[in-house]
Amino acid sequence: MTSQFLSNEEIVQRARKNLPQGAWDYLVGASESETTMRRNRLAFDRIAFRPRILNDVSVIDTATTFLGNNLRIPALLAPIGSLQVFNPEGGAASTRAAAEFGITHVVSSVTEPSLEDIAAAADHPKVFQLYIHGDWGWVEEMVARIKDAGYIGLCITVDTAHYSRRERPMLTGWMPPTRRERPSPVHSASVTWDTVDKIKSLAGLPFMLKGIATAEDAKIAIEHGVDVVWVSNHGGRQLDHGQGTMDMLGEIVEAVDGKAEIVLDGGVQRGADILKAVALGARAVALGKMQGWGLAADGQAGIVRMLEILEDEIIVAMALLGVTSIDQLGPDYVCEDQAVTTPHEMSAWTNMPGNRIL
């Protein structure tokens, strides 16, 4: 089945056929009016390429590193809760796909199977993402489990002090498994920079904060010794009416000033998007919806195929930009332009030929 997928749009279409309405709404939706989610995409579309010609691009290297580990392309699998609603193997399928393809999986603390089972699913570097859903004793227990399981880094998500109004699933009455037994909101609402310092010291692992949206907070993160600044608005699923992440990236890169690696998520759909983020200062992007679509379309194989398609798009774009390695990319290769804001007859994503519907 997977070999039939020629584009990631076909993977999206297969995922839509495979998923019930509730799970689909959970994957593709965002909070309130979904303005932030739409801005994520528009922020990418406003960036145009400035290609250079007559360079030898017969050999292209798409690889980079993250926390000292090799990445086949500048991408991670983002932490997604309740992956088991897209495929019964859940996080284990995602982590095996990351290992097979050659990138890092950032494992959500609110997905199944257990963090130990996901760690054991593949012998490959993995980072663990933690929501603070308990008191300090709970945190200590979780960090001990994370370290014992062999995760190479710890990520704290910091944009969930309050759960948002996600109206698509609200209107259908569908709730992800992690919300059916709701943890007390007091713990996530009480997290401060002091909490971050305590967890970072306790873990003793490379440490990242996911959900930084301003230069001000990026500077504070650097002062607290954070190793990875993760530019994110939760895919538009938390605070609505925020900026697109690519609109935030410039000021955050300036604030970080090379003192930490930068990851960006939100709206990534093409290999070209990955190159735009890298050109403007990100070490890698993180794939959320794309991962969910691949998983729903064909499990582990669907994610691997999704990544192969992104890799092919990256190779084509790099060759046509006139670069042969990721480290050659920089701000000179991009500029701001007008975004295409509406689907049209030349858009492959909205005008698939009927005989290719899988």
Image (cartoon, rainbow, N blue to C red):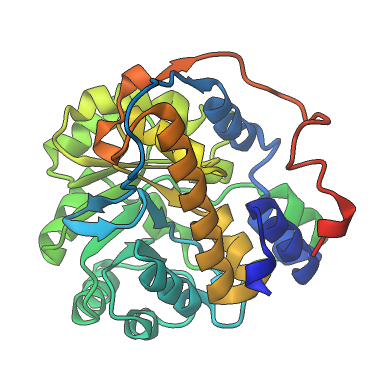
**355 displayed left or right of 204:** right
Q: Residue at x 41, y 36 (%)?
A: 318
Vertical placement of 91 versus 201: above or below? below
**83 displayed left or right of 119:** right
Q: Residue at x 76, y 71 (%)?
A: 18
Q: Residue furthest right?
A: 354
Q: Residue at x 56, y 70 (%)?
A: 82
Q: Residue 258: x, y in percent?
A: 16, 32
- Choose top left, top right, bottom left or bottom right for residue 88: bottom right
Question: Which residue is nearer to you in this view: 157 or 128?
Answer: 128
Q: Is residue 255 visible?
A: yes
**8 displayed left or right of 320:** right
Question: Which residue is nearer to you in this view: 325 or 206?
Answer: 325
Vertical placement of 22 versus 92: above or below? above
- Choose top left, top right, bottom left or bottom right for residue 38: top right
Vertical placement of 20 versus 72: above or below? below
Question: Which residue is nearer to you in this view: 102 or 88?
Answer: 102
Q: Quadrant of the C terminus?
A: bottom right
Q: Quadrant of the N terminus?
A: bottom right
Q: Is residue 233 visible?
A: no
Q: Residue 320: x, y in percent?
A: 46, 31
Q: Residue at x 35, y 36 (%)?
A: 57
**232 displayed left or right of 346:** left
Q: Residue 347: x, y in percent?
A: 75, 34
Q: Residue 105: x, y in percent?
A: 37, 64
